[in-house]
Image: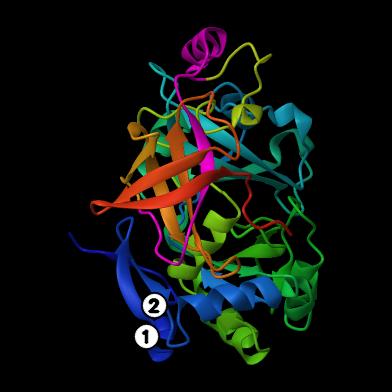
Amino acid sequence: MTLRQSPLDTEHRTLGATMVEFGGWEMPIAYPSGTIEEHLACRSNAVMFDVSHLGTVRVEGPGARERLQATLTNDLTKITPGRAQYTHLLDAGDASVVDDIIVWWHQRVGDSDVSDSDVFDVMPNASNTSRVVGAIGGTDTTSGRAVIAVQGPRARASVASVFPEAADVGRFRVATPNWNGVQCTVAGTGYTGEAGVEIAVPVDAATGLWRSLLAEGIAPAGLGARDTLRLEAALPLHGHELGAGITSLQAGLGWVVAWDKPEFRGRDAAIAERERGIARRLVGIATEGRRPARAGCAVSIDGQAVGVVTSGNYSPVLGHGIALAFVPPDTAEGRSVEVDVRGKSLPGRVAATPFVTR
């Protein structure tokens, strides 16, 4: 299989990034500074990630909002143009999460026909774009842009010197400002638990914007740091905490489902599960020492296997291992557990999430 490459691929290689396969793309997992340093820089200052591997499906024209409202779980009537919304696309049969999605809702600039000016940029996970298009229609515009996510407590202050209009975009807001005469789409979203913005920039301008941000002192960070950051924030990763056989309710994300909506894909199965109760739930586990649990490790209570780890890693902020795991729904916070890591028992406890709060 030929891996897709980001429009910023040459920039990563020039900076000495270690490149890996991710969701059918070749992307930087870390730069020479290393994942831990990149992680801590995001928590204390600002870093930028290339997340061009995330899909973009553009849905627009007559009936666009109605089509999304009838398919996705969340309620688009709760927001207006210029806002973003987190939502799920469910399997019609068992209500498992086909994909978790951010919808960026904006309007065509200069369009006088307000009724037909809505543009929805639906942002699926890396490998799910074709399935999302199959469910909602629209046009895959992934190849026409790069997406740069600037994250951290100083993200907006750092971006302001390069692209002040982007820095002004608030949390879960969406705008379409110009940078050097090129229209971009900017959202106050991210995947780190930190403040920041994500900038979708046309391919021809992507390298210029990346270099300008780099010159401002915003360090690049790879997908390794993005993963440890999202784990500290207890944010789900598709294929781990969400996916085939995993429902919104099991993942603790029932708030993403607008239960009063008369229609969305998988509604009957989702309501049936809510009525009978979930068989398992996602929890956080804090483990002792630096050695982390990993996805697939068994979780036991009093010597009896009761669950499985979905994601685990070392927390650079906390200095010990953290994990997410599915366990019986009545497993209480603070409960002692053991995690089987390659045949050795790793002590831990069920912990409150997010592990790190900002």
Are the residues flagged by discs 2 and 1 in contact, CB closer than 8 Å? Answer: yes
**266 lies above or below 302:** above
Q: Quadrant of residue 313?
A: bottom left
Q: How is the image coloured?
A: rainbow
Whether residue 126 is visible to the viewer of this picture, yes or no, is no
Residue 288 falls within the magenta-colored stretch: yes
Q: Which element is circle 2 on?
A: helix
Q: Quadrant of residue 143?
A: bottom left
Q: Badge 1 local density, few (<14 within 10 Å), some, or many (20+)?
A: some
Q: Nearer the viewer, residue 177 or 31?
A: 31
* Residue 9: mark: 2
Query: Which residue does the numbered mark 1 point to in the structure image?
Result: 13
The residue positioned 72% from the left and 73% from the top of the image is: 155
Question: Residue 318 in the image: x percent, y percent?
Answer: 59, 65
State how far apart marks 2 and 1 are (Cα): 6 Å
Instruction: Locate residue 220 relative to residue 213 in the image: left or right.
Output: left
Question: Residue 314 in the image: x percent, y percent?
Answer: 47, 64
Region of the chain picked out in magenta, as a range: 265-294
